[in-house]
Image (tube, helix red, strand yellow):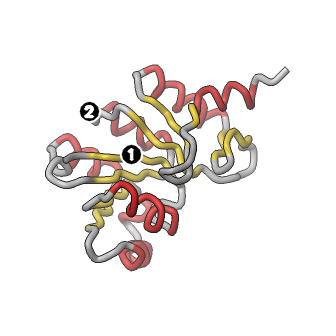
Amino acid sequence: MAIVLVRIDDRLVHGQIVQGWLKNIAVDKIAVASDFVANDNMQKILMSLSVPNNVSLDIKTVEEITQSIINGEYEKLRTMIIAAKPEEILYMVDKGANFKQVNVGGMHYAQDKKQVLKNVFVDDKDIEVLKILFQKGIELEGRILPLDERINVMEAIGKSFYKK
């Protein structure tokens, strides 16, 4: 048991997580790392309503989730960590979280972002942070759902930004 999935998804907990991932990877806990949601009671309530009763939900700031990881609080249960942005994952790694792989599942369109995968749009800052994670030896795999083809995110970025 332990952390079974680390995911970047700017929607955090939503239908693809509940209907797609939870049924295929059988987690006991979802840990949402979000300063915004941790400080917004309405967002916490809405997310808690979407999670099945047999899965616990831990919503904390990025710093608090990081401390929980370092303290081993997620080692006893099959846990999915979800953060909205690559820099939140980098923060966790820089503070001591030992992630081998990160699923880049949903980074949606915004101005100045370029599409590199079906559900992944990035800007220069995102690319820089993803490169740092990759250089730290973390596999960055892109897929929306667990049965989708695994795509190397760094290769997809290269192909999208360096087309001839």
Tell me whether the residue at label 1 lies in contact with that at label 2, contact meaning CB atoms closer than 8 angstroms.
Answer: no
List x then y, in percent, for residue 78: 24, 53
Q: Residue at x 36, y 47 (%)?
A: 5
10 is higher (above) or lower (below) than 157: below
Name the residue tied to disc 1. Answer: 6
Quarter of the view holding residue 21: bottom left
Ranked by sequence position, the earlier of labels 1 and 2 is: 1
Amino acid type of the residue that numbered disc 1 sits on in the rendered structure: Val
Q: In the rendered view of the protein, which quadrant contains the C terminus?
A: top right
Quarter of the view holding residue 102: top left
Q: Secondary structure at mark 2?
A: loop
Q: Residue at x 37, y 66 (%)?
A: 39
Name the residue furthest right: 164
Q: Secondary structure at mark 1?
A: strand
Q: Please state if 95 lies on the left or on the right of 45 as rendered.
A: left
Count numbered badges in the picture: 2
Amino acid type of the residue that numbered disc 2 sits on in the rendered structure: Gly
Q: CA distance from mark 1 to mark 2?
A: 14 Å
Name the residue tied to disc 2. Answer: 96
